[in-house]
Image (cartoon, rainbow, N blue to C red):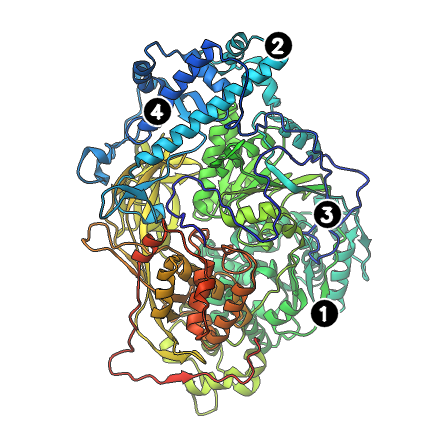
């Protein structure tokens, strides 16, 4: 039974108990020595081939060498050495500080500065509390205390506390302070900040009946509009824990001094001088600090080798064995393999390759693919990142252009950044080719000015575009593009692995429409060239996407690669020697590692899962650079993510390529093969949803044959900790196959209607392009003329392509305007669906690591006005999402059971009703109301009501109902690709703990006990994926139940009911409860006595938030027939 832990604000320690598992190495007594061993055998890099072949070699373990400052937990250490009076006084001071500090932490409006603590502590110890006393306490427990000067402005909350009034503060009470003048020196002081960093109070709430503090049961973003409370029991437990730890630390210190025969009092007075904080005006770095840092004064032009840099980092004071056991892998370098072409290249083309890229020979995979193309085949190349795939399509196109200047080529990329990158590369080549340098080679995408589009269409020889422009602009206007299409000889589709699942289905039909139009204008000789990352089925996937059979695969890699090291780097506990202190801040840990690499001349890119994390990490990097006295480096580190204006994106791309930037913080927008120059290291912050994403990101380092580094930084979530405990899976899991569904009726009909608008449909001829469903769609849903041609249905007119969305792009955007000092500049353009969850009056908006306060949010004008502020806190919205069926359109009975599955429209309502102000340690500073309108969207989906008998069993065994529903939903969702061609994220479920009604309403908001699945794409009509899954719901339930029963884990794991993509991090999960629900739905027998008992402290909260579901009725006046499913053969497909 998983513990209900969604409530805690601070980072959590996740303990997943496995049968037959090895005991976890919680302490830092042993670590892995990453020094490479030259005798080890070489192997191939997983980003090159994922075939389950030989494993990369592991670094040798050295159990004798401990981290420089690794400490065991000192709470149980005893000493026979008599305590000097000086240490008794220090213990008295520590106990008083501990008591007062813990009390102050329950008062959000009081900063724990030395001045705030001093007078109260002195009242306890009956003497003066000196800075030197605190420094000596920190000497004994250095990793448990933060004692430094901090900017006074950063500690200002800027709001009155919620405790000062009956209600939370309103958004209009935010005040922006004008910039201080030079005369206001008194307001620019830094204050001496004291903090315990070895654990935090867990957020508690008032019990609805007793009024006493009780454990919170919901995620912070879903909590009521009230400040947290803290119970006396929790306060005393934390105080006693710290006191015991300090006593143990004193005993350790006295024992060590006795062994070395040194006076402990003189020694601690001497050592504590290093921990006495100094004011900023007199803060020169001490020789000890410089020696510990060991950082070059300037960023070196020639960096050291990666093994040397890793060895230096491991000697740092803050390194406490973050590299997990067996988590340091070395991949040996690979020598190049060259090949020859079957035909002669012109001297001009040879010169261009040499002058732009210093190429004198082609790699073997390049030569093979170009030869296959020359022989008349379509080509798919599936090799690692940075293996020179772009040359495979550039050389044949330029070779053909030299022979015929009328030749046209179309390069299709999934992102605008990739298109811009390849355009720049090709133009460099053309500059060295006489006669071709004047050819028009331009991008044709949504950013292309309207005035330039006709010129590019008529004069362009090579255009760089994307599937969206081909679908919406080029194909519907085939008459205007006829000359281009008649002379089209090459269609290049790069990053083919992106076109998977529903998006892949759309692109497959777009390619068929393109082939159909080219054939109609007399061009049946178009050659298709595709490049992909390493996947399981590249040849089959290309045939499916383009509808062609003559395909040649090249999947071996002849390019060289440098030595590569991979590290699994686990975020340490707040006190590295004390696992009970909780996992530390992964962002701060990543920022520290990022800066250590950058300042040693390593060009680094760091990948984050979402946009906000990207901004938070950049802010943490800037803070770390400031702490290291290297603020001049900030200008060379930037973020790159979706939402930035096109001009900003182009500028960042240029600076990355030119080498002006040495550090980049990005989302997956740069995961694809954009050439941003040489990169030495990749830091992936948190597991990026799939192994394929991780390998793709890892491949971005080492693009120039140097040695390189890839680091996966583990966060506190269960998925991250799973891979930290099982690093082998990162390197040995096979690649998943790419799948495209060409029988998704919504997708098929949409593109057939688009094709009919481009050119009337004749089923006898066009079935070759659109498959056997064409005739059914034509006869039932299209208009037939007297000549037997079928035309677009009127409901799709006048522009069918605009009604068929091929991916979740949005036309509506909010403008984020920076009004600081009257600037009025657009910072970003934010999609409307994100706006209400990202911008709200009084909230903090992050851009390039800087904080901006939202002053005005105007939904009607679709803009927000923000001002730059200097604060050390951020905001976390509080919202709830209701996912509920609207009406029933279809019913299927589960064979052998009384339960039924339902299908129909789904309503998703999202409301942001306030936000918390949170500091960097995830502590709540304030609660603020906002009045945003709800965001309501509709989709299609299926649902199953949990039987009342299952609810009774769960209550009887005290198993959390919300966790049980969550586990059952994940188990079913993970198996959906077995029955319906889809990819993760195409179908979603409600991944949240049941939440209460809106805070101001008198009654509690309770969620129905229901498993709900809905299409994430396709708008109100859905994508058709859940429709097909509905047909196999009984098999899905059966297989999910069997998987739960067969899995040996106790609480749920990634192999049964946890999901790598769960946005709530699988924190509320009941595997046993999920099995009860699935068996009840299937009508299977449940052995109640064999079920585990749930935890009493969590079960009442879970039961209170879920109620029995009421059946959703069909539309009024509509009768539905219950479909009885009879399966003679129960074997899964």
Q: Residues within 10 Å of mark 2 (few under 14, many from 20)?
A: few
Residue 870 in view in this figure: yes
Pinpoint residue 525: horizontal percent, then vertical percent.
Answer: 66, 73
Judged by depth in the image, the label closer to the viewer, 3 or 2, is: 2
Residue located 23% across and 45% down the image: 210
Give the mark, 3 or 2, whose residue is nearer the N terminus.
3
Q: Would residue 1042 appear left or right of 527 to someone viewing this image?
A: left
Label 3 vs 4, first from the N-terminus? 3
Name the residue beneath numbered marker 3: 56
Q: Residues within 10 Å of mark 1 (few under 14, many from 20)?
A: some
Relative horizontal placement of residue 737, taking residue 852 as reference (left or right) = right
Q: CA distance from mark 3 to mark 2?
A: 48 Å
Query: Which numbered tag is attached to residue 261?
Result: 2
Q: Are marks 3 and 4 in contact (CB under 8 Å)?
A: no
- Which is nearer the N-term, disc 1 or disc 2? 2
Upstream in sequence: badge 2 or badge 4? 4
Quarter of the picture containing the N terminus is bottom left
Q: Earlier in the sequence, mark 4 or mark 1?
A: 4
> From the viewer's perspective, is residue 72 above or below residue 408?
above
Q: Quote the CA–CA distance across marks 4 and 1.
A: 77 Å
Q: Nearer the viewer, mark 4 or mark 1?
A: 4
Is tag 3's residue or tag 1's residue first in the polypeptide sequence? 3
Q: Tell me the SS state at disc 1.
A: loop
Cα gap from disc 2 to disc 4, whole angstroms: 34 Å
Q: Which residue is mark 4?
A: 99
Rendered location of residue 481, percent (x, y): 52, 68
The span from disc 3 to disc 1 (Cα, nearest Å) is 35 Å
Q: Nearer the viewer, residue 534 or 182?
A: 534
Q: Are marks 1 and 2 in contact (CB under 8 Å)?
A: no
């Amino acid at each position: 039974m998983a513990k209900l832990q969604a409530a805690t604000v601070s980072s959590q320690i996740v303990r997943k108990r496995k049968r037959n598992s090895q005991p976890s190495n919680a302490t830092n007594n042993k670590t892995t020595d990453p020094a490479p061993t030259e005798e080890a055998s070489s192997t191939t890099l997983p980003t090159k081939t994922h075939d389950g072949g030989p494993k990369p070699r592991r670094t040798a373990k050295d159990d004798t060498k401990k981290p420089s400052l690794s400490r065991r937990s000192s709470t149980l250490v005893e000493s026979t050495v008599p305590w000097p009076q000086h240490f008794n006084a220090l213990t008295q001071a520590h106990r008083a500080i501990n008591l007062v500090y813990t009390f102050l932490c329950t008062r959000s409006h009081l900063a724990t500065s030395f001045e705030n603590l001093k007078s109260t502590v002195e009242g306890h110890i009956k003497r003066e509390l000196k800075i030197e006393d605190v420094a000596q306490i920190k000497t004994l427990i250095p990793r448990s205390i933060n004692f430094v000067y901090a900017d006074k402005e950063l500690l200002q909350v800027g709001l009155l506390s919620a405790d000062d009034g009956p209600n939370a503060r309103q958004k209009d009470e935010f005040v922006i302070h004008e910039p201080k003048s030079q005369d206001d020196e008194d307001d620019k002081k830094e204050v001496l900040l004291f903090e315990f960093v070895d654990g935090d109070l867990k957020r508690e709430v008032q019990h609805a009946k007793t009024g006493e503090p009780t454990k919170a049961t919901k995620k912070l973003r879903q909590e009521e509009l009230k400040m947290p409370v803290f119970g006396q029991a929790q306060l005393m437990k934390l105080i006693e824990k710290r006191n015991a730890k300090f006593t143990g630390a004193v005993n350790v210190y006295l024992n060590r001094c006795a062994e070395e025969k040194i006076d402990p009092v003189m020694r601690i007075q001497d050592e504590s001088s290093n921990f006495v904080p100094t004011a900023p005006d007199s803060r020169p770095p001490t020789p000890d600090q410089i020696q510990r840092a060991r950082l070059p004064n300037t960023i070196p032009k020639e960096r050291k080798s990666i093994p040397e840099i890793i060895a230096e980092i491991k000697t740092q004071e803050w390194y406490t064995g973050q590299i997990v056991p067996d988590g340091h892998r070395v991949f040996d370098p690979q020598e190049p393999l060259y090949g020859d072409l079957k035909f002669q290249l012109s001297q001009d083309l040879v010169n261009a390759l040499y002058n732009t890229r210093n190429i004198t020979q082609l790699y073997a995979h390049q030569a093979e693919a170009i030869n296959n193309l020359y022989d008349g085949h379509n080509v798919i190349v599936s090799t690692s990142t940075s293996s020179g795939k772009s040359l495979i399509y550039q050389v044949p196109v330029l070779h053909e252009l030299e022979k015929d200047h009328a030749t046209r080529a179309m390069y299709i990329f999934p992102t605008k950044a990739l298109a811009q990158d390849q355009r720049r590369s090709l133009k460099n080549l053309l500059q060295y080719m006489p006669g071709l340098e004047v050819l028009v080679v331009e991008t044709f995408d949504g950013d292309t000015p309207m005035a330039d589009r006709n010129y590019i269409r008529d004069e362009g020889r090579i255009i760089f575009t994307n599937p969206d422009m081909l679908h919406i602009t080029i194909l519907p206007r085939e008459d205007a593009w006829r000359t281009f299409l008649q002379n089209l000889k090459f269609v290049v589709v790069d990053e083919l692995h992106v076109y998977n699942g529903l998006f892949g289905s759309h692109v497959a039909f777009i390619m068929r429409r393109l082939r159909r139009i080219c054939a109609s204008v007399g061009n049946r000789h178009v050659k298709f060239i595709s490049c992909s990352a390493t996947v399981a089925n590249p040849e089959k996937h290309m045939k499916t996407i383009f509808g062609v059979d003559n395909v040649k695969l090249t999947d071996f890699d002849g390019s060289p690669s440098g030595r590569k090291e991979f590290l699994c780097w686990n975020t340490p506990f707040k006190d590295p020697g004390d696992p009970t202190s909780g996992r530390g801040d992964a962002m701060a840990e990543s920022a520290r590692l990022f800066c250590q690499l950058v300042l040693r001349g390593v060009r680094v890119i760091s990948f984050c899962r979402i946009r906000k994390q990207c901004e938070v990490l950049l802010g943490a990097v800037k803070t770390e650079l400031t702490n290291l006295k290297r603020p001049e480096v900030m200008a060379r580190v930037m973020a790159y993510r979706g939402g930035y204006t096109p001009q900003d994106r182009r500028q960042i791309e240029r600076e990355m390529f030119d080498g002006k930037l040495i550090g980049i913080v990005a989302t997956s927008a740069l995961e694809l093969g954009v050439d941003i120059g040489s990169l030495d290291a990749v830091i992936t912050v948190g597991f990026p949803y799939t192994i394929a994403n991780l390998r793709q990101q890892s491949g971005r380092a080492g693009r120039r044959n140097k040695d390189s580094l890839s680091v996966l930084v583990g966060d506190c979530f269960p998925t991250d900790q799973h891979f930290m405990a099982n690093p082998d899976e990162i390197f040995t899991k096979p690649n998943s196959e790419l799948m495209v569904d060409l029988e998704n009726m919504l997708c098929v009909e949409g593109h057939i209607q688009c094709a009919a608008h481009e050119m009337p449909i004749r089923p006898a001829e066009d079935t070759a392009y659109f498959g056997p469903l064409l005739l059914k769609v034509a006869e039932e849903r299209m208009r037939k003329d007297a000549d037997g041609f079928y035309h677009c249905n009127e409901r799709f007119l006048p522009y069918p392509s605009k009604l068929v969305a091929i991916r979740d792009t949005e036309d509506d955007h909010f403008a984020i305007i920076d009004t600081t000092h009257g600037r009025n500049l657009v910072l970003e353009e934010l999609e409307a669906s994100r706006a209400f969850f990202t911008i709200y009056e009084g909230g903090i908006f992050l851009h390039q690591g800087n904080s901006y306060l939202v002053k005005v949010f105007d939904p009607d004008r679709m803009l927000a006005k923000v001002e730059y502020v200097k604060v050390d806190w951020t905001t976390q919205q509080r919202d709830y999402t209701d996912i509920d069926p609207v009406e029933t359109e279809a019913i299927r009975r589960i064979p052998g059971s009384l339960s039924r599955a339902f299908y129909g429209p789904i309503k998703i309502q999202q409301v942001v009703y306030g936000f918390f102000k949170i500091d960097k340690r995830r502590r709540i500073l304030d609660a603020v109301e906002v009045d945003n309108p709800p965001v309501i969207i509709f989709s299609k989906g299926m649902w199953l009501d949990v039987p009342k008998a299952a609810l009774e069993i769960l209550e009887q065994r005290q198993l959390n109902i919300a966790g049980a529903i969550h586990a059952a939903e994940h188990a079913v969702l993970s198996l959906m690709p077995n029955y319906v061609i889809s990819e993760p994220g195409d179908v979603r479920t409600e991944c949240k703990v049941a939440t209460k009604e809106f805070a101001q309403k008198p009654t509690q908001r309770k969620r129905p006990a229901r498993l709900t699945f809905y299409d994430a794409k396709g708008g109100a009509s859905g994508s058709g994926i859940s429709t097909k899954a509905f047909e196999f719901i009984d098999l899905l339930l059966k297989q999910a139940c069997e998987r739960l029963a067969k899995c040996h884990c106790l609480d749920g794991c990634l192999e049964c009911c946890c999901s790598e993509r769960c946005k709530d991090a699988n924190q509320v999960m009941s595997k046993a409860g999920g099995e009860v629900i699935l068996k009840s739905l299937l009508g299977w027998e449940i052995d109640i006595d064999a079920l585990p008992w749930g935890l009493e402290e969590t079960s009442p909260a879970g039961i209170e938030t879920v109620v029995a579901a009421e059946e959703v009725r069909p539309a009024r006046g509509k009768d539905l027939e219950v479909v009885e499913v009879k399966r003679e053969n129960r074997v899964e497909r």
